């Protein structure tokens, strides 16, 4: 049985989300998903990134629990969180992750030190700048994996989304030297590798999951892989999940990972 799971989505409980919980669940059902995880933003960042979520956290949990009951037997609704830069405050972020009653915790990098927003604070007009961003990105990604309490590492191709001025092919091969040690550390940690499908909706026109990346991850002992659309609109829920399952099968994977109460569960693809 093929399980189609989207483990990275956002509702209006994220500062940049554009749909409500019911709209997201209905979209997941239309796409034939077995499971969908709502993983709202909670960023440790100099500019702030926790206030929007914190002000609505209780309401959000109640709404997600109601959706779990309402959609039972049709779509498994998972309660997650996306922690941005949790390595900047490891003790506090670990306590938050442990106390939040989450099914899964994604650790992501939206900023790099010192508080530079990957989307807003770089021009990406030269290859030198692109290279500098990815060197720092993977240095901090390895730190995150070492010190943070997360289940999944989110969107390793996040900076690539913005590099269409300089990069002509949608590949991570240019940063292979930096990425391989990260994949080794990730596999050793047991943290899952996320294949983010946003690239289908950007200049790359393909989801994450190049063959050499998946091969290296497997060779290092990595077995846990999640798929996430990173949807902020209901229309994008489940986007690219089927295509990414096919990529995984081609690379020798026969399952994807979801999390229930922070415990990994393998589902066949």
Image (cartoon, rainbow, N blue to C red):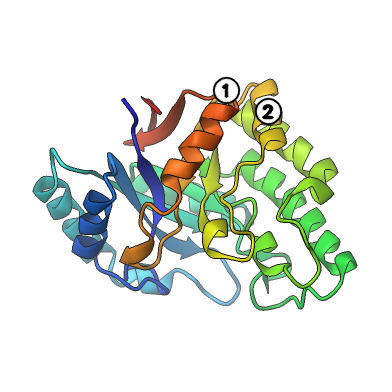
Report the residue marked by disc 1: 252
Residue 61 located left or right of residue 126:
left
Q: Quadrant of the N terminus?
A: top left
Q: Is residue 108 above or below residue 194?
A: below
Residue occupying image coordinates x 25% and y 68%: 20
| Residue position marked by numbered label 2 in the rendering | 215
- Image vertical order of residue 19 relative to residue 196, above or below: below
Q: Does 183 sit left or right of 181 as displayed?
A: left
- Mark 2 near mark 1, Cβ–Cβ under 8 Å? yes
**Could you tell me how far apart the alpha carbons at marks 2 and 1 are, in whole angstroms?**
8 Å
Q: Position of residue 228 (x, y in %)?
A: 45, 49
Q: Residue furthest right?
A: 128
- Viewer can see residue 98: no
Q: Quadrant of residue 56?
A: bottom left
What residue is rendered at 77% in x and 36% in y? 181
Callout 1: helix, strand or loop?
loop
Residue 26 lies, in percent from the top left, at 20, 57
Judge from the rendering whether residue 233 lies leftward or rightward of residue 69; answer left or right: right
Q: Residue at x 39, y 57 (%)?
A: 9
Closest to the observer, 200 or 68: 200
Residue 148 image-quadrant placement: top right
């Amino acid at each position: 049985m093929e399980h189609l799971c989207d483990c990275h989505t956002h509702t209006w409980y994220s500062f940049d989300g554009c749909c409500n919980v019911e709209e997201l669940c209905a979209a997941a059902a239309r796409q034939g998903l077995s499971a969908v995880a709502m993983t709202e933003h909670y960023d440790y960042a100099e500019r702030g990134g926790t206030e929007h979520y914190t002000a609505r956290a209780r309401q959000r949990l109640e709404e997600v629990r109601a959706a779990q009951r309402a959609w039972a037997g049709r779509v498994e609704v998972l309660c997650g969180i996306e922690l941005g830069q949790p390595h900047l405050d490891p003790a506090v972020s670990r306590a938050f992750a442990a106390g939040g009653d989450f099914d899964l915790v994604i650790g992501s990098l939206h900023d790099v030190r010192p508080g530079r927003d990957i989307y807003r604070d770089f021009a990406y007009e030269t290859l030198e700048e692109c290279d500098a961003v990815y060197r720092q990105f993977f240095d901090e990604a390895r730190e995150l994996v070492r010190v943070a309490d997360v289940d999944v590492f989110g969107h390793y191709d996040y900076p690539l989304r913005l590099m269409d001025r300089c990069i002509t092919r949608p590949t991570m091969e240019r940063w292979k030297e930096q990425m391989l040690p990260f994949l080794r550390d990730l596999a050793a940690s047991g943290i899952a590798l996320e294949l983010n499908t946003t690239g289908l909706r950007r200049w790359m026109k393909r989801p994450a999951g190049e063959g050499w990346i998946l091969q290296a991850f497997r060779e290092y002992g990595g077995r846990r892989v999640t798929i996430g659309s990173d949807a902020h609109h209901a229309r994008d829920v489940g986007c690219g999940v089927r295509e990414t399952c096919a990529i995984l099968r081609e690379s020798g994977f026969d399952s994807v990972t979801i999390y229930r109460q922070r415990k990994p569960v393998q589902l066949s693809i």
